[in-house]
């Protein structure tokens, strides 16, 4: 379980525990005898309880906000470390392959960037365990300018079976997937580690977090400009 999930689960467990304890306390207060003396005592306790409850909820809200800020900050820090990384999908694997040479050859032949050599790549390796399908190839460039040049040339891979993508963090990748589900595949893409969404009002919004996506979903609960083909694809996917 990653740090983001641990923080979220810790907050969720705290909220569940608090709610259960408060519900039990409220039931006990309602079941107490209603004679005059007890009534006055219970009335006082009830007021104290409600004040305490409000205080706890305010504290919970503040902690939740701090957790969201912390997770966003950690996510941004992790994305900064991936600034010069791209992922190449679909490249066939070979036994005892030289990953760097394979990446350089592909970029030269398929993307027409001839001014690249092995010295321009600081590290290159496959992601994940061995499988029947080619594993993605992670390429870390020494220069962000070269990385950007490769990124801009990714359209030259169309029809080759190869795809270049950014190396998103898990939380950001989940946001990207959910954005595409709601607004449509063709209306969501990534740029410099951020998710770009073409909204139904034709404006574009760059987002980084699930909270930002939720705000957009609230503003546009129905992606009204989703094409018929995209709707058909969604139905077939379900």
Image: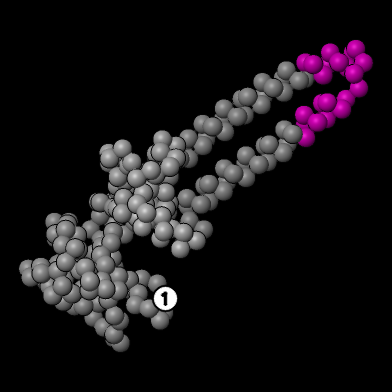
Write the start and end of the magenta stretch as one range.
24-44
The magenta stretch spans residue 34: yes
Residue 112 visible somewhere in the drawing: yes
Q: Is residue 132 left or right of residue 100?
A: right
**What residue occupies the far front of the structure in this picture?**
228
Counting from the top left corner in percent of width and height, residue 33 is at: 91, 22
Relative to 28, is 37 above or below? above
Type of colouring: one colour
List the residue tagged with mark 1: 129
Residue found 77% across the figure and 15% down from its top = 44
Q: Main secondary structure of the magenta part?
A: helix
Q: Is residue 126 left or right of residue 116?
A: right
Residue found 16% across the figure and 58% down from its top = 152
Please tell me which residue lies in front, 224 or 114.
Answer: 224
Please tell me how many numbered marks the rendered image carries.
1
Please tell me which residue lies in front, 161 or 107.
Answer: 161
Counting from the top left corner in percent of width and height, residue 121 is at: 18, 68
Q: Secondary structure at mark 1?
A: loop
Relative to 37, is 87 above or below? below
Counting from the top left corner in percent of width and height, residue 179 is at: 39, 49
Residue found 82% across the figure and 26% down from its top = 29
Q: Which image quadrant is residue 43 in?
A: top right
Q: Which image quadrant is residue 204 in?
A: top left
Crowdedness of circle 1 by 10 Å Cα count: few (<14), some, many (20+)? few
**What residue occupies the far left of the structure in this picture?**
115
The magenta stretch spans residue 228: no
Residue found 87% across the figure and 27% down from its top = 31
Q: Is residue 188 left or right of residue 215?
A: left
Relative to 193, is 138 above or below? below
Counting from the top left corner in percent of width and height, residue 15 is at: 62, 39
Relative to 21, is 84 above or below? below
């Amino acid at each position: 379980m990653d740090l983001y999930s641990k923080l979220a689960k810790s907050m969720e467990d705290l909220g569940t525990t608090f709610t259960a304890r408060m519900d039990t306390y409220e039931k006990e207060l309602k079941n107490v005898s209603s004679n005059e003396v007890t009534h006055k005592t219970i009335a006082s306790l009830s007021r104290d309880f409600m004040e305490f409850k409000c205080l706890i909820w305010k504290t919970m809200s503040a902690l939740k906000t701090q957790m969201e800020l912390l997770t966003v900050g950690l996510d941004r820090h992790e994305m900064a470390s991936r600034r010069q990384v791209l992922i190449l999908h679909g490249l066939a694997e070979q036994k005892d392959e030289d990953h760097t040479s394979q990446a350089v050859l592909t970029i030269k032949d398929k993307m027409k960037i001839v001014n690249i050599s092995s010295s321009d790549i600081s590290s290159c390796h496959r992601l994940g365990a061995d499988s029947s399908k080619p594993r993605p190839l992670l390429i870390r460039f020494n220069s962000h300018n070269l990385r950007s040049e490769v990124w801009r040339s990714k359209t030259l891979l169309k029809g080759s079976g190869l795809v270049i993508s950014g190396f998103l963090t898990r939380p950001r990748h989940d946001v990207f997937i959910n954005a595409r589900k709601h607004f449509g595949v063709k209306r969501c893409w990534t740029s410099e580690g951020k998710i770009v969404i073409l909204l139904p009002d034709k404006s574009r919004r760059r987002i980084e977090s699930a909270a930002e996506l939720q705000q957009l979903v609230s503003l546009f609960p129905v992606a009204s400009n989703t094409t018929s083909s995209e709707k058909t694809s969604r139905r077939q996917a379900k």
